[in-house]
Image (cartoon, grey):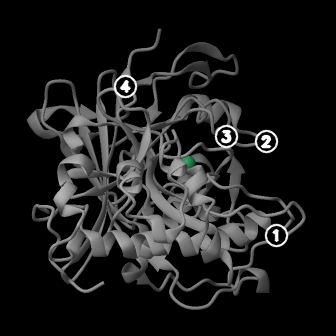
């Protein structure tokens, strides 16, 4: 796509340029849920555009755009996603575009819409693929000398998470309650989590079903991935620390995960591919891959106490991931496990090399030892009630900017 002028106004530094065109599900006024594409500060109503006949040549049934999830559209496959993208780019840039003549019918301000969950998530998997994060947690929870467990460099460690509590940006998060173990005690107590934390992650959305018993290879993985969102994997560290041995995360994670509402497609992210870190020792053949499969996506986390200004508390980058998405999907399916359209696979906390780039407060404060300083003199070890967390992500190369917008969540007191 050359840098043609879009006839919809795109403010400078907008995440939603003509190069992006991310998909979401929204409602506005009395209209039922429908699919839309973000452009500048507007949403293009795909159902209305389809109704006016603009997609007739693509042979996409209009009904896929008048749903409360993108699953049916995504299931149409990669060739259709790509054809629709090309059509939309033409319609949004052409001089004398016929779409411009009906702009009033098909465009609505983002400020006026309510964003819903973009996909129905059947299954959710969380990986643990940042070597910096895994090393930090190994130091904090176990032994700094052997921070990484022996399997870590040989496979993308992951666990099956909870899909039912994945929620869209803006959803308020109730502080979870559960068992915790007081310091120097062997008797658990019950109550609201005192160590409520965030995890800065990205997640990808599965775009193609597989058969049980079959596997996706690293070479074919790209055909199975529709796009990505920002993913905040809220974590209650005190509940997690007591429960996780020997089977891994459970109630310390399953109460909520928040996602950004717009799914940015892999096609839009293609210009931002970069080489990943060298993997040593060499990985097994089924995890080897060709080409550059990491992405240069800048990430930031801001914390905003009630009634105060926000403070950016971390800046990280998705390119730091040790294991890439193709390796994660190949590993996930190598045993014959099937995946389905709409399944969500999160990266694991994305930490960089310094405490300004860590993806969790556990790491930023080194388990509470070094509180985070906020604007106005406030400090935080972990989240307090009524705190709001905002995560943002965007990629930029030359004049091309593609962003994810925000995922926002506010903590409500336990009940
Ligand atoms: Ca996580």
Is residue 153 something one can see in this rendering?
yes
Q: Which residue is mark 2?
A: 246
The local secondary structure at tag 1 comes to: loop
Q: Where 179 falls versus 311 (above or below)? A: above
Q: Residue at x 57, y 32 (%)?
A: 165
**Horizontal and vertical percent for residue 83?**
47, 75
Q: Nearer the viewer, residue 367 or 302?
A: 302
Q: Kindly identify which residue carries mark 4.
A: 411
* Mark 2 or 1, nearer chain start: 2
The x and y percentages for residue 255 are 56, 29
User: In screen coordinates, is 228 left or right of 182?
Assistant: left
Label 2 environment density (alpha carbons within 10 Å; few <14, some 14–19, many ≥20): few
For ligand 1, tell me if the residue under mark 3 lies within 8 Å.
yes
- Neighbour class for label 1 at 10 Å: few (<14), some, many (≥20)? some
**Lower position in the chain sequence, tag 4 or tag 2:** 2
Mark 2–mark 3 distance (CA, rounded to whole Å) = 9 Å
Q: Earlier in the sequence, mark 4 or mark 1?
A: 1
Q: CA distance from mark 3 to mark 4?
A: 21 Å
Which residue occupies the foreground of this view, 316 or 21?
21
Q: Quick one: label 3, few (<14), some, or many (20+) residues within 10 Å?
A: many
Label 3 sits on a secondary structure element that is: loop
Name the quadrant containing residue 371: top left
Q: Looking at the image, is mark 2 or mark 1 nearer the viewer?
A: 1
Q: Nearer the viewer, mark 2 or mark 3?
A: 3
Report the front residue among 59 and 331.
Answer: 59
Q: Is residue 260 left or right of residue 335?
A: left
């Amino acid at each position: 796509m050359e840098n043609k002028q879009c006839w919809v106004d795109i403010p400078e530094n907008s995440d939603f340029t003509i190069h992006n065109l991310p998909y979401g599900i929204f409602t506005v006024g009395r209209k039922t849920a429908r699919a839309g594409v973000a452009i500048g500060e507007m949403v293009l109503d795909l159902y209305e555009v389809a109704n006016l006949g603009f997609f007739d040549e693509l042979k996409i049934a209009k009904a896929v755009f008048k749903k409360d999830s993108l699953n049916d559209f995504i299931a149409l496959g990669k060739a259709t996603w790509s054809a629709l993208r090309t059509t939309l780019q033409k319609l949004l840039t052409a001089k004398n575009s016929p779409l411009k003549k009906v702009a009033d019918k098909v465009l609505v301000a983002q400020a006026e819409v309510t964003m819903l969950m973009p996909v129905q998530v059947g299954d959710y998997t969380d990986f643990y693929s940042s070597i910096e994060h895994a090393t930090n947690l190994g130091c904090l929870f176990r032994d700094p000398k052997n921070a990484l467990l022996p399997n870590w460099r040989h496979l993308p460690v992951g666990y099956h998470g909870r899909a039912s509590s994945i929620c869209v940006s803006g959803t308020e998060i109730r502080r979870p309650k559960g068992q915790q173990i007081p310091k120097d005690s062997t008797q658990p107590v019950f109550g609201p989590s005192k160590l409520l934390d965030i995890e800065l992650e990205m997640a990808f959305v599965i775009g193609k079903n597989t058969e049980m018993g079959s596997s996706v290879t690293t070479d074919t993985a790209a055909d199975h991935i529709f796009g990505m969102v920002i993913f905040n994997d809220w974590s209650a560290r005190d509940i997690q620390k007591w429960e996780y041995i020997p089977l891994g995360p459970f109630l310390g994670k399953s109460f909520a995960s928040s996602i950004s509402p717009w799914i940015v497609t892999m096609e839009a992210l293609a210009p931002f591919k970069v080489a990943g870190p060298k993997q040593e020792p060499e990985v097994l053949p089924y995890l080897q891959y060709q080409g550059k499969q990491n992405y240069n996506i800048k990430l930031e986390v801001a914390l905003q106490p009630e009634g105060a200004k926000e403070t950016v508390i971390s800046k990280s980058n998705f390119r730091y991931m040790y294991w890439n998405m193709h390796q994660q999907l190949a590993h996930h399916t190598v045993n014959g496990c099937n995946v389905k359209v709409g399944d969500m696979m999160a990266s694991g906390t994305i930490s960089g090399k310094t405490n300004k780039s860590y993806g969790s407060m556990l790491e930023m404060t080194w388990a509470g030892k070094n509180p985070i300083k906020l604007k106005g003199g406030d400090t935080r070890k972990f989240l307090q009630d009524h705190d709001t967390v905002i995560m943002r992500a965007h990629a930029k190369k030359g004049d091309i900017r593609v962003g994810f917008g925000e995922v926002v969540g506010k903590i409500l007191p336990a009940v």
